[in-house]
Image: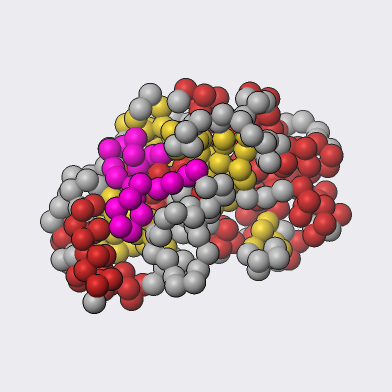
Amino acid sequence: MDDLQQLLPAARQAAALCQRVQRVHIRSTRQDDAIWRKEGHEHVTIADYGAQAILCRAIRQLFPDDAVIAEEGADHFLQYVAAGEREEVRRQVSAALGEEVSEAQLCVWLDHGQEREAARIWVIDPIDGTKGFIALRHYVVAVGLLDEGRQVVAGLLAAPGWPGAGRLLYTRDGGALMEPLKGGAACQLQVSRRREPADLLLMESFEPSHTSHSRMAQLCETAGLAAARVERIDSQEKYGRVAAGQADLYLRQTFPGGSAHRIWDHAAGTALVRAAGGIVSDLDGSALDFSQGATLARNAGVIAANPNIHERVVDGLASLAAQ
């Protein structure tokens, strides 16, 4: 989907804003001026609003008739963010864009394309991995694209925390590419073909609230993967590691009674892994269904894996569920 290429500059601007907010606020004693909690007790930051405004501004300019599903919105921004903090968002966005913008413009951009019926939908998570962002670990700026059939057809991840000064990953012409976040030569991405357990690297969420680390260990034992190494990081960067062939499996489980996964947490990563030759499904092997609005309401959990181990993981989960 070539249209995605037109958003790469905005993704870089959004990532640069996030890095600047980290330097100015998160690494200093000014954290309280940059971080709040939403009604659901999730964190939101200056950078969440700033990055989304930049991305939606670009979509509004480039693809004005497309719809948007995004994590943040102007109502919360105006109701819960104090005037001084809103001014800081305005300053940060102005600096990122190299032009003065108003609070009114920010609100227009934050809400652009939402609640709209359209053939195509851009799915945005301005900071995926907010806890990782706050803790100076891993996070990404994530953009996915759904077509008229609500299939995810393109995606990009700007990953400032990727080892080696950050990376930009994106789909193009049916494949997946990666290049330095600040620009440089792109390389083609290809998932691994590893299958021997001792050679595998499994990715799981850093936050215990996102996964059961003990159940992951049970799965590895049941699926014959106990010898595999496990790395825990935040955000859809886990998808990126699988797409790049650096890791072999990302598993996201569900908790009994828990809410359905939000599509902005998975759309971009799903597109990248598939474009790199991997398989993305839910825990029983079914394709992820992005047609149910803002959630993956028809799916339980996520498996993103190289094709040589995906079926083994699905079978292992089925065996574990039967115990």
Q: Is residue 38 above or below residue 165?
A: below
Image quadrant occupied by the C terminus: bottom left
Segment tinted magenta in the rendering: 271-291
Question: At which x and y percent is residue 83?
Answer: 86, 54
**Residue farthest along the right direction in this orientation:** 83
Res. 95 in view: no
Left or right: residue 29 versus residue 187 is right
Q: Nearer the viewer, residue 121 or 244?
A: 121
Q: Is residue 149 above or below residue 286?
A: above
**Residue farthest along the left direction in this orientation:** 196
Quadrant assignment, res 91: top right
Q: Is residue 15 magenta?
A: no
Question: At which x and y percent is residue 139?
Answer: 51, 53
Question: At which x and y percent is residue 26?
Answer: 64, 60
Residue under the image location 36 percent in, 72 percent down: 213
Q: Nearer the viewer, residue 165 or 311?
A: 311
Main SS of the magenta segment?
loop
Residue under the image location 22 percent in, 45 percent down: 307
How many numbered markers are drawn?
Answer: 0
Q: Is residue 282 magenta?
A: yes
